[in-house]
Amino acid sequence: MINLFQHLRNESVEAPLIQLLESVINASKEIAFRVRQGALAGVLGSTQDQNIQGETQKNLDVISNQLLKDLLLACPQVRALASEEEDTVVAGNANGEFIIAFDPLDGSSNIDINGQIGTIFSIYRAQENIAANDEAQFRQKGEQQVCAGYILYGPSTLLVITTGKGTHAFTLDATQGTFLLTANNINIPADTKEFAINMSNQRFWSDNMRRYLNDLVLGESGPRGKNFNMRWNAAMVGDVHRIISRGGIFLYPSDNRNPKQPAKLRLLYEANPMALLLENAGGKAWNENQRILEIEPRELHERVAVILGSANEVQICLKYITAEH
Ligand code: AFP
C-alpha cells in the first residue's frame, strides 16, 4: 500500500501544496489522539462561549481549532485561514501560495456521545491583489478549489481527499502514523435506495421538498416504485462518508424556521469541499437551484441549502423541487 504523500507525488501535486497538506495531516493526527482519549483527556463537554454562528463551543471544537491554527500558521505556504470557529480571516505568511478554510470539528453534537465527527478542509490559491486578511480572499467559487477533503474520526481514522483528479480514501495506520491508500478513484453508484435528512424539520420545508420526501417514504407503494432506507448521522462528514462508501442522497434543504437563516450548512467549509469530493467521485452537489461549486460566495460564513450524492437521485430530487415537477 502506498502512503498519502507517495500518492500525491504520483498525482504530480505541487510541492508547496504537499507541504500545506502535511500541516493539515499533522494537526488531524493530534485531534484524532484527543478524540480517542475522550473523557480521559478532559476534552469533552462545552465551554461557556459561543462562536460567530451563535453555537455553544465544545471544548474539543476549541482545541481542534487551535491545533489547526497553530500548525497552519507555522506553514510558509499558508497566506490566510478561515474557520467555522473564527469570526473572520486570520492572516498567515505573506508569501504563502494558498489559503485554507476548515470546519475543525464537524458534528460537535456527536462529541459527547462518542459519535462520528470530522475535520473538513478546503484549499484555494491565494489572490495576489487582495490583502491576506481580507475576507475577499475567500470569495472564490468552489470550482476554484485546488484541494478538498475530510478526516473522519471513527472506528478508523480516515482521510478522503481530492485535488481534482478523482477522490481517494486513506486509512491511518496508527502504528506507523501514516495514512495508507485504501480506496483509489472512488466512483459512487448513480442510483440509490438510501436518503439522509433530518425529518423533524419537515413542517418547515417547501411543499415540493415535502412531496419528494413523501414519495421516498411511500416506497414501492408510491410513484418511486421502490423502497428506501433512511440514515441521519447529525454530522455531515459521517453522512457524506457513507455516500462516498456506498451511494445515497444527503439533504439539508432551506426551511422557514428562521427567515433570517433559511439554510444551515456553510458554503465555505462544508458544502464546497464536500461538493468537490462528490463530483470527483461521479456524484452531484446542488443547492436548490444551482451547482454548489458555481455559487458566487458573498460572505465568509454564508449558509446554503445542500442536496448531494448519487447523481441520478439528486437529479430526480431537483425535478421535484423545481417548477418542472
Ligand atoms: P454541529 O457541528 O453543530 O453538530 O452541526 C453539524 C452540522 O453542521 C452538519 O454536520 C450536520 O449534517 C448538521 O449540522 C446536523 O444538523 P441538525 O442537528 O439540525 O440535524
Image (cartoon, grey):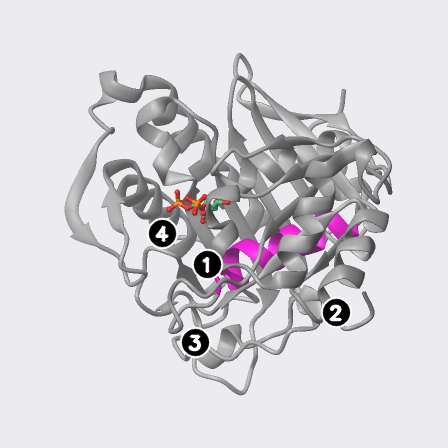
Q: Relative to residue 315, is residue 33 depicted above or below?
A: above
Give the magenta range: 263-280
Q: Count the marks.
A: 4
Q: Relative to residue 191, is residue 146 depicted above or below?
A: below
Give the residue pinned by disc 4: 69
Instruction: Tell me which label, 4 or 3, sits earlier in the chain.
Output: 4
Q: CA distance from mark 4 to mark 3?
A: 15 Å
- Between 207 and 5, the one nearer to me in the picture: 207
Q: Are marks 4 and 3 in contact (CB under 8 Å)?
A: no
Q: Are marks 4 and 1 in contact (CB under 8 Å)?
A: no
Give the residue pinned by disc 2: 322
- Between 291 and 104, the one nearer to me in the picture: 291
Labels 2, 1: front one: 2
Instruction: Please give left or right for residue 42 compared with residue 86 in the image.
Output: left
**Label 4 element class:** helix
Tell whether position 272 is magenta: yes
Q: Report the residue at 57% width, 46% height from top.
A: 21
Give the residue pinned by disc 3: 132
**Label 3 element class:** loop
The spot of residue 109 in percent (x, y) is 35, 37
Labels 1, 3: front one: 1
Which residue ends up furthest to the bottom in the rendered image?
A: 129
Q: CA distance from mark 4 to mark 1?
A: 24 Å
Labels 4, 1: front one: 1
Tell whether position 96 is magenta: no
Instruction: Tell me which label, 3 or 2, sits earlier in the chain.
Output: 3
Give the residue pinned by disc 1: 264
Which residue ends up furthest to the front in the rendered image?
A: 221
Which residue ends up furthest to the left in the rendered image?
A: 48
Q: Report the residue at 25% width, 46% height from top.
A: 57
